[in-house]
Structures are given as structure tokens and as C-alpha cells.
Amino acid sequence: MRGFRYIARMSTTLPPSPASVPARLNAWQVLACGAAIVTLSMGVRHGFGLWLLPITSAQDWSRESFAFAMAVQNLSWGVFGIFAGMAADRFGAFRVLMVGAVMYALGLLGMAWSTTTTGFVLTAGILIGAAQAGTTYAVIYGVIGRQIPPERRSWAMGVAAAAGSFGQFLMVPVEGWLISAFGWQQALLWLSAALLLVIPLAIGLREPGFSGGQAPPREQTIMQALREALGYRSFQLLMAGYFVCGFQVVFIGVHLPSYLKDNGLSPEVASYALALIGLFNVVGTYAAGALGQRLPKRFILAFIYLARAVAIGVFLLVPLSPASVYLFAAVMGLLWLSTVPPTNAVVAQIFGVAHLSMLGGFVFFSHQIGSFMGVWLGGVLYDRTGSYDIVWLIAIALGVFAALINLPVREGAIVRGPQRVGASA
């Protein structure tokens, strides 16, 4: 509660900014609008696994076809995330969020009406992936980084990530109910309309200093910031760790419902499991953000990745039942998106916030390459072997790898020469 009381005081008692520094948005406004946007955009995304069996059955497609579209979606999200981040840093988050919301709505319509695998890949894959780039963490975290003081930045990022988790808890059962009540196509149409709510919410994130489409002055160019980050060892290690994060969570999120059904469990168990992941991740992401204010973030990340490997291993060893699924979902929920606040907070801590959306987009691109591999390999290896066992084992090994490579990350602010001075954090 101390964090909430601090934000309340901060939003009402900060002295006026100097004329040369743009005034900050109200902190509660940033958190409320950003959290609501992430709840919608991430909540819808987390339920896509519920459409695997209805769509493949109705269209007579293989699981690999659906998995490939989801894999392309994640890769598209990563690629376009870089450019969405650049645009948000340059023109402000408001414009990017509006465009992303419209693209998301159109992508869901295309997902409902596609009759070929090519059309499905173009809409459910490329278009929705690009839309997610403009409506999720990289853009929202850029606003938080610029509008929330450094001493509460990790905490605020944890709040936003927890909102995405709450979105999963809230939206996955809703999506399951929509499919049952209206059919899978009509359910997608309802979600398309819901995504347009992002547009009025984005009005609350119109940042001072971006009027007329001009970014506030900064001393480091985009290319300088990019060369600096990509050549920095700790940034490379963070990107490698985020690859593993993407592999694990997207494989589980998309393929867990089918894995459970293959083993004789009802679709309701899968829906409840995904919802539990979202519910417990509200706690996990908030805790990771809050702990990031007090503990080295590299230790937090190493623990999360190692704990995921252990949780998956135990899940595969114990007899499968609804109880074991729910326990696994609760544990994984605590670890699900809890990598997001410390990873992005480290990036801001090292490089400052002037190019935070762009650099966050590059880190997330690595995450999405992992997502592509996780969801696609899940479909390919299932079709080849009739089992998900190999992919589960890969997920365990990658978790151990990610834990080890996060330990050497250096969290201190980068030291720049006189010709490479960047915007301060």
C-alpha cells in the first residue's frame, strides 16, 4: 500500500515542472488507462488457444496450420513492436494506440471470416500481431517510463503487467462463454467490437511534449541508442532470456488446452487453468515489480526462469488430473509475466527512458522469436510424433539456460562518452 499512497501524493503534490521540461500526466491516470488497455489487448490474446480445436475442426485444418498462424502472429508482434516503439517515442503513444486498436479489430474480423490457411495467417497472424505491437507492453511501458519517477518505475510496471494478467483471468472465461453461447465466429466479432474501447482509453495517455507529432528534445539519436544497446553485453543477455520466456509461455498458452483434452480432460479444465494462470499472475507480476525496487533484478529473473523449469518438470512427473492442472496453473501464473517488469525496468535503468519504447520493442522481438518457436514447434512435433513430450522437455532445458544467463547482467546506468550522452532516466 505504500506504493499506492506514494503515487497518490506524487500525482497531486509535485511542484510545477520547469518550462523546458514537459509536465507529467497524472500518475493514476497513466496507470488506470494503461492497465485497462493492457487488460483488453492481452486478455483477448491469452484466449486464442480456445479457438484451436473449434477452428481446425470447422475448417478441416491441421493443428500445425493453426499453430503456424499463431507463431506468425508472435513473430509479427515482435517485428512490428520495434517500429511501434520508435513511433511511440517519436509521435507519442496516443497515435500508435489508436492505429493498433483499429488493426486489432480488423484482424479479429479476418480471423472469423478467413476460409483459407493463407488468409488466416494474414489476419490472425500478421495483422493481429502488428496490432498487438501497438497496444501492449512496449508502448504502455514507454509512457510509464516517461511519466513515472525512477524510484517507482519498477513498481508501476508491475501494476501494468498485473493488469495484463487480470485481463487473462477476466477475458479467458468470457471468451470460452462467448464460444459456447454464440459459436466461435460470432465470439470473434464480439471481441472485435470490444477492442475499439482502446481508442477512448488512449486519450488518457496523450503525453505533454508530443504536440504536433514532435517528440521532446533528446541528445541521442535513434541509431546511436540502437548501436549502444545492441553492442552492450547485458542487453544481449536480457534478449536471450526473453527468448526463453516467449517460448515457454506461448507454447503453454496455445497448446495446453489441446494437451489436456488429448489426455481425457474436459475443455472446462483448460479454460479454468488459463484463467488461474491469469489470476495468480496478477500477484506474480505485481510482486516482481515491487521486489524490483528492493532486490537486484537479475536475481529475480534467474529465480523466475529456474522455478518455471522445476514447475514444468513436476507437472510432467505427477499423475494428470484436474487438481494437478490447477496447481500447475497457479504456480505458472505466479511466474507467467513476472519477467516483464524487471526486464523492462533494467532496460530503463541502464539506458534511460528517451528511447525506452524502441529498446523495449527490440527486447520483445527476441521474446517473440521464442514465442514463434514455442507455438510452431508444438504444432509440428505434435503432428510428427502425436505427443507434446519433446517440447515440454525443451521448455525445461531452456528455463535452466535462461536462469544462468541472467545472473551476469549489469544493472547500473551505462557510462557514455561526451559524444554519446543520452537522455537521463
Image (spheres, helix red, strand yellow):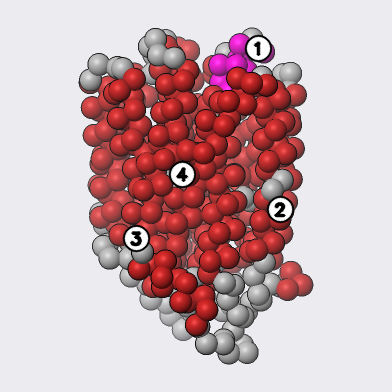
Residue bearing the label numbered 1: 58
Residue bearing the label numbered 2: 199
> Closer to the camera: disc 2 or disc 1?
2
- Drawn side of residue 154 relative to residue 60, left or right: left
In space, the residues marked 2 and 3 are separated at their CA atoms by: 29 Å
In space, the residues marked 4 and 2 are separated at their CA atoms by: 21 Å
Magenta-highlighted residues: 51-59
Q: Circles 2 and 1: CB distance less than 8 Å?
A: no
Name the amino acid, label 4.
Answer: Ser
In space, the residues marked 1 and 3 are separated at their CA atoms by: 45 Å
Q: Circles 4 and 1: CB distance less than 8 Å?
A: no
Crowd tier of the residue under label 1, counting other residues whose Cα lies within 10 Å: few below 14, some 14–19, many 20 or above? few
Crowd tier of the residue under label 4, counting other residues whose Cα lies within 10 Å: few below 14, some 14–19, many 20 or above? many
Residue 270 in view: yes
76 lies above or below 353:
above
Residues 424 and 146: in front is: 146
Q: Residue, x 25% and y 55% (percent of image)?
A: 299
Q: Residue, x 41% and y 47% (percent of image)?
A: 282
Name the amino acid, label 2.
Answer: Ile
Q: In which quarter of the image is the N terminus?
A: bottom left
In space, the residues marked 2 and 1 are separated at their CA atoms by: 33 Å
Answer with mark 4 or mark 2, whichever residue precedes in sequence: 4
In the drawing, what numbered circle is on residue 165? 4
- Drawn side of residue 178 relative to residue 119, left or right: left
Q: Quadrant of residue 127 in the image?
A: top right
Answer with mark 1 or mark 3, whichever residue precedes in sequence: 1
